[in-house]
Amino acid sequence: MPPSPRGDERASRTPLLEIVVPARNEERRLPGGLLQLCAKLAQMPFPTAVIVVDNNSTDTTADIIRNWPQGEVPVRLVQCATPGKGAAVRAGLLVTKAPLVGFCDADMATDLDAITVAVGLLLGGERVVIGSRAHAFSEVENRHSRVRELGAVGFRALARRLVRGVSDTQCGFKFFDGRLAREVAARLRTPGFAFDVELLARCAAAGAPAMEIPIQWRDMPGSRFSPARHSAGIVLELGRILLRLHAESRGVIRPAWEHAPDPVGSP
């Protein structure tokens, strides 16, 4: 079905909100997730857009976006050659232009009604709004193994050294003042799973601590995180984040973004 005249007019306007979706080999989950996301965004009373970042997929993820029917909510593809979710989110945030931006996972594990809450808070003056599975009023359907749960406890203990006052740094549902997000994304140097910690720590250092909101969250099958394969790497990433931020605060090293190239995106 071709887009309606209203959809054409809305899609041609500059979006107030852009949402980044990082994707690596998501040909199975991405179509359903995008349908949900676009349906939610089409209900918003202002123009919106979606940016899907293909992170070196070897399946048809990129083709799905290239062939996605354009309607009220434009969906564009950006390529990120650097492996890692952090690198993909960074690449997506850097090509945004909207006053408000955010990112969410391709599985849409967080109920998308939380977008309305997050946007309302941003329009009311908050600069960083994140979903928290640890919030007292969150509803969480969790099927994680005991090993993964114990690993999460250890991760949170380390993350609190970098991001004080945040109970859940890793929920893949975060929204920002657009200018702040682009400035902080340019400074990110953590490509892997721990990138959220660096992102939130840099926001807090810029005077924009995160506000956590309750969410409805379902543990979706197909997670790429494995405690056995990734735990050691995450601990190393957290250590590097701590050392770099400490060195930057003391002026021992120049901020990495002063001499590092930005990722190249494709329309």
Image (spheres, rainbow, N blue to C red):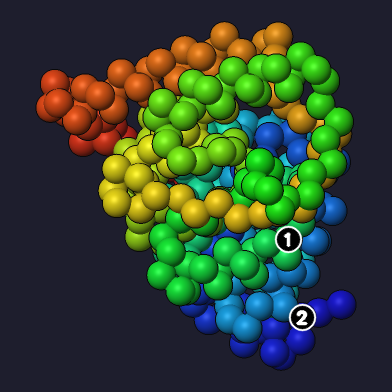
Q: Position of residue 163 (x, y in %)?
A: 42, 35
* Left or right: where 134 falls relative to 157: right
Q: Position of residue 64 (x, y in %)?
A: 76, 50
- Looking at the image, tell me whether mark 2 or mark 1 is earlier in sequence order: 2
Q: Is residue 35 above or below residue 253?
A: below
Location of residue 255 with respect to 136 vertically, above or below: above
> Dot 2, how many residues are within 10 Å of its Cα: few (below 14), some (14-19), or many (20+)?
few
Q: Name the element at disc 1.
A: loop
Is any part of residue 259 visible from this angle? no
x 42%, y 36%: residue: 164
What amino acid is labelled 2 in the image?
Pro
Q: Which mark is residue 192?
A: none
The residue under the point 45% across, 55% down is 128
Q: Is residue 260 left or right of residue 250?
A: right
**Which image quarter: residue 188?**
top left
Q: Is 193 on the left-hand or right-hand side of 183?
A: right
Q: CA distance from mark 2 to mark 1?
A: 23 Å
Q: Residue at x 62, y 50 (%)?
A: 131
> Is 177 or 52 nearer to us in this picture?
177
Residue positioned 70% across, 9% down in the render: 228
Q: Residue furthest front?
A: 136
Name the amino acid, label 1: Leu
Q: Which residue is denoted by mark 1 in the rendering?
A: 112
* Label 2 element class: loop
Q: Residue furthest left?
A: 251
- Foreground of the two, 203 or 161: 161
Q: Quadrant of the N terminus?
A: bottom right
27 left or right of 101? Answer: right
Residue labelled with disc 2: 3
